[in-house]
Image (cartoon, rainbow, N blue to C red):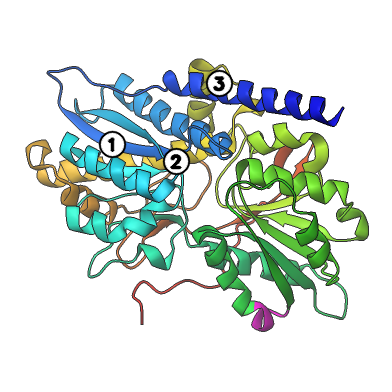
Amino acid sequence: MKKRVKRIGLSLVAVGLCIVLSLTAAIPVCEAGPNERVVKIGVASYFTGPIASCGIPGYYGIVDYLKLVNDQGGLDGVKLEGRWANTAQSPIPLLLTAHKRWKTEGVLIESAISNSHAYIAPTMQRDEIPAIPFAPYSTLMITEPEMWVFGTSAGLGPEFATFMKWVRDNWIEQRPPRIGIMLIDFEEGWETYEGSKHAAEIGVEFVGKEVIPVFGVIDTSVEWIRLANKNPDWIYVMHFGGSMAVLVKDAARLEIMKKGIKLCAGAGNLDEGVFRMVGGDADGWYQIYPFVCNGDDPQLPGMKAVLDAAKDNRGWEVEDVPQFYFVGWIVAKVIVEAIRLAIENVGFENLSGRAIRDGVCSIRDFDLGFGIPLVNVSDEKPYFIEVERMFRVEESRLWPIITDFLKPYYLNPRHLQ
């Protein structure tokens, strides 16, 4: 019987991989005609593997926004062309390979549905090609004297510290709240862990961490039990895709929440792909998140365009639009604004990676259209979203539970001391 179940499981995995691979064969690329003025944008993503549930919708968000701009005439006639690369198996080496290819193809700005650009920031600086990945600012992104890799938000360490302060501000017992963390063994996880150093000054007790591999996660029972035995009031989890689904399923099986422990995920950890994999097991979780999602007010000025594009291009109803689609759309808006400013500053004929980098750093009071504070970017503030919000999962959807924006508890320094 066990062998039969195993064969069935392997067959389902094989079918799933075939479906994903067939999807990647039809990945859309925004291509301009041979006689059109074009700016090329490189986008690396997880199109296969356990984090494809984040990578594919994130990429769709970027190319659908580029399509909208092109359909409206481009940037004063200049079209935007997307180039893609699959970096699922080995994100950093494959991104570096893609970057080298894109450089020869004339790509002038890059993005990635990962934080891998932080690891090759010196290469981006040397080649003078900026990048805005789907990743919060981190100290790994720093290059001197100018920034070439920019973050979406203030950082994962500040995000975790902001979560801890939110817990403390809403705590009613006399003793301090006790908080533990499950983290991915990658830069995102270790950047998150940095926030724990502020626990004492915030007024919470940090009880410890458990480290989870990036890939190949099939059981996290030991880590859950070990951390739960330290009697935390909250456990914060930072992981993605299929591995995050394992964490959620194991927490439900072990009845972690029934033990009185509340669970919160980091930004983008509980996406629609995870919801599909875990059923209702994510209900009751919280998530801290700087972007918008399908549970937000559809009357926000920017929502109509993104929801219409999701419906027209992907066939998604409002409740089906993934979080990473919104992220891709927003990142693309910032990239396009940087290109627009660069063309305005130097003209299309003189456009270069450096000009677009300068365009990123000259973004001032740019309205994303989603109720998020206006965007300002500079070398001293190399990210574009300055706030966080708290959400809760109900019926496998993410719903905002507070309307107020949370300012980061602390900010990483722009320059290393």
The residue drawn where x is 41% and y is 42% is 331
Is residue 344 visible in the rendered structure shown here?
A: yes
Q: Specify the farthest residue to the left.
A: 349
Q: Residue 20, located in which quarter of the rendered image?
A: top right
Amino acid of disc 2: Ile
First in sequence, mark 3 or 2: give its number.
3
Q: Give the mark toward the camera: 1 or 2.
A: 1
Residue at point 72%, 73% (across, down): 208
Q: Given contact means CB atoms under 8 Å apart, are the residues at marks 1 and 3 in contact?
A: no
Residue beneath disc 2: 330
70 or 271, which is in the foreground? Answer: 271
346 sits to left or right of 388? left
Residue 7: give x, y in percent of width and height: 74, 25
Rounded to the nearest angstrom, the CA distance separating label 1 from label 2 is 15 Å
Q: Residue at left 52%, top 23%?
A: 310
**Left or right: 154, with 184 as reference point:** left
Q: Nearer the viewer's eye, disc 3 or disc 2?
A: 3
Which residue is labeled 3 in the image? 18
Question: Which span of residues is magenta-colored?
Answer: 199-203
Nearest to N terminus: mark 1 or mark 2: 1
379 vs 129: above or below: below
How many residues crowd around disc 3 within 10 Å: few (fewer than 14), some, or many (20 or more)?
few
Residue 222's spot in the image, x, y percent? 79, 59
Q: CA distance from mark 3 to mark 2?
A: 30 Å
User: Which-is-in-front pick, marks 1 and 3?
Assistant: 3
Q: Is residue 202 a member of the stretch shown in magenta?
A: yes
* Mark 1 residue element: strand
Name the residue beneath numbered marker 1.
41
Label 2: element kind: helix
Question: Label 3's element?
Answer: helix
Q: Is residue 313 left or right of 237 when viewed as pictured?
A: left
